[in-house]
Image: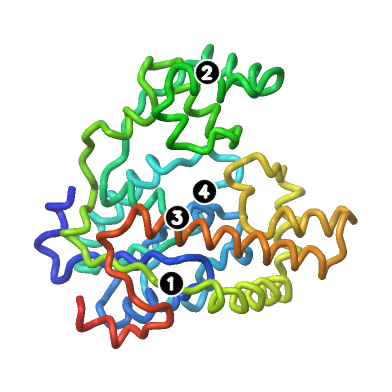
Amino acid sequence: MHDLMMNEPGRPILIAGPTASGKSSLALELARHTHGCIINADALQVYACWKILTARPGDQDMATCPHRLFGYVGMNESYSVGRWLRDLKSVLVKCRSKNLRPIIVGGTGLYLTSLTTGLIEIPGIPRVVRNEADRIRLETPARFSEDLLAYDPETANTIDIRNPVRAQRAWEVLTATGIGLAQWHRTPHSPVLPTVSARAFVLNATAEWLLPRIRSRFEHMVSRGALDEVRSAMEAGYDRRKPSCKALGASELVSFINGEHSLPEAIELATIRTRQFAKRQRTWFRNKMADWECVAAGISAKDLVPRL
């Protein structure tokens, strides 16, 4: 697929960065300078139910230049990195036909590394295995980590086996395929867009620089109607276990609506959780995306354009 982009007037631009680091505003500036199309690489911004809480581009920004893969998935729909890659391929084809420069921007590290290094094609998990795993999770969840340590220590040493979701997933893969998740990750796979065929940038933002931005942004979200957005999601079947309901701040605002916390407490909890998430993002970028060019958060598009 990367050959598809080689005859474009400019290589695709990739922009990664932690939450609140200014990715969207930079992408918008670059789109104006480069006749670009902004393509979402954020796992929560694909969902239609979250516009405010995920800081999705506003209507005015969306009208300024083409935006794709934003807000087009229902809250109860199944969505995955594999579907995102398939949808992205279609968008890249359309960008080429319209002579638009793709600007892929987001903070979901798994999406971006799958784009540039390839996605592992693990076979689907049979229903019987999934049902057994669900039973174990309810009755003896420690069995996941015990089995992994006994039969797949390589995977056990590369994932957080204390995380029940990750431990169950690794157990399901091992049980269904007889091959450990770590071994699957070593299987050769072709990328959609390797970094050598793009201009890939990671925004470097310190925790001290990010924290006040995170706090003020969340307060601004609340003032813009985030509570109404959360109420609408609750009426539509909000369930914090669903992938679509992992928007930062959603569970904290639900707790306020349910009378479990005051609004200032909910805002503080959401700020802390977002700060922790940003730390995990920075760790992912540092460990998994070493071949991306690191630039200072707050850089202007004019300063970046000469590097394109």
Q: Nearer the viewer, residue 156 or 268?
A: 156
Residue 247 badge? none
Q: CA distance from mark 1 to mark 2?
A: 41 Å
Residue type, label 2: Asp
Q: CA distance from mark 1 to mark 3?
A: 12 Å
Question: Counting residues from the N terminus, which is met first, the one under dot 3 or under dot 4?
Answer: 4
Residue at image mark 1: 23
Residue at image mark 4: 73
Q: Residue at x 75, y 67 (%)?
A: 267
Q: Quadrant of residue 263?
A: bottom right
- Count of numbered tags: 4
Farthest residue, direction top: 128
- Residue 145: x and y in percent read 56, 25
- Mark 1 and mark 2 residues within 8 Å of each other at the beta carbon: no
Number of the front mark, 1 or 2:
2
Secondary structure under badge 1? helix
- Residue 180: x and y in percent read 38, 23
Residue at image mark 2: 147
Q: CA distance from mark 3 to mark 4?
A: 16 Å
Residue 108 badge? 3
Question: Counting residues from the N terminus, which is met first, the one under dot 1 or under dot 2?
Answer: 1
Farthest residue, direction right: 259
Q: CA distance from mark 1 to mark 4?
A: 22 Å
Position of 59 with respect to 123 (left or right) is: right
**Mark 1: few/some/many CA within 10 Å (<14, 14-19, 20+):** many
Secondary structure under badge 3? loop
**Mark 4: few/some/many CA within 10 Å (<14, 14-19, 20+):** some
